[in-house]
Image (spheres, rainbow, N blue to C red):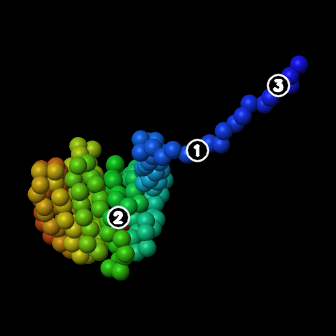
Amino acid sequence: MQEPRPPVVEPYTFVFSWKRFLVHCAIISFCVFLGLMTWYLGKPPSIRFYETKSEAPLTTPLAPGINMALNIRSSVAVKQSEPLQVELFKGNVYFDIQKHAIKQLEIKVGSTIIKDFGTRFSIQLHKDGTGHIAVADGHIKIHTPSGNVFQINAFEEAEFDETGISKHRLLSERNIAPWHSQQ
């Protein structure tokens, strides 16, 4: 009887194929795209919530040169972005922004945006959705959803809503945020 012979294995020869090359490039490109999207979208914004109930008002720094004071029964959300974004949900808030502050501040009250320019000011949100702003130093700009922009300067106050401002008048510094000056 004859011994079985092992099968002869021929050496593998590589044959270049454009189709195979393009399929591999497409797979690698898709993986790189997914990796970049994960890196770009995977960083959720840092949002901090501040709320006071019936206890004493809260005073806290938001960023270097930007301080915020919340009155009792007030709440805000602060989103760390450029510019720093604060959304007032209810109550009264007082901001003290130094002239040397690195970050800009943008406050959202309902659908109205208030942009700050190195100032001290207070905002009060009424239950009916209207707001009151009083500026102690510098000036702010109110951007309404209707596209109007209003500027409020130092020692002025105004009522605002989604359509515009009303009762724009002068006031004394002690009336800017009476609840804050009592601290």
The residue that disc 2 covers is 82
Q: Residues within 10 Å of mark 2 (few under 14, many from 20)?
A: few
Disc 3/disc 1 C-alpha distance (Å): 27 Å
The residue that disc 3 covers is 4
The residue that disc 1 covers is 13
Q: Is residue 6 above or below residue 108?
A: above
Looking at the image, tell me whether mark 3 or mark 1 is earlier in sequence order: 3
> Dot 3: what SS?
loop
Q: Is residue 101 above or below residue 1?
A: below
Q: Please report the residue visible at 13 percent of the width from the left and 61 percent of the height from the top.
A: 149
Q: Residue furthest right?
A: 1
Q: Nearer the viewer, residue 68 or 28?
A: 28
Q: Is residue 6 above or below residue 113?
A: above
- Residue 117 circle label: none
Asked if labels 2 and 3 touch by Cβ distance under 8 angstroms, the answer is: no
Looking at the image, tell me whether mark 2 or mark 1 is earlier in sequence order: 1
Q: Amino acid at mark 3?
A: Pro
Disc 3/disc 2 C-alpha distance (Å): 78 Å
Q: Is any atom of residue 173 visible in this view?
A: no
Q: Please report the residue visible at 74 percent of the width from the left and 30 percent of the height from the top.
A: 7
Q: Position of residue 34 (x, y in %)?
A: 45, 47
Q: Amino acid at mark 1?
A: Thr
> Dot 1: what SS?
loop
Disc 2/disc 1 C-alpha distance (Å): 58 Å
Q: Position of residue 80 (x, y in %)?
A: 41, 60
Q: Position of residue 162 (x, y in %)?
A: 16, 49
Q: Amino acid at mark 2?
A: Glu
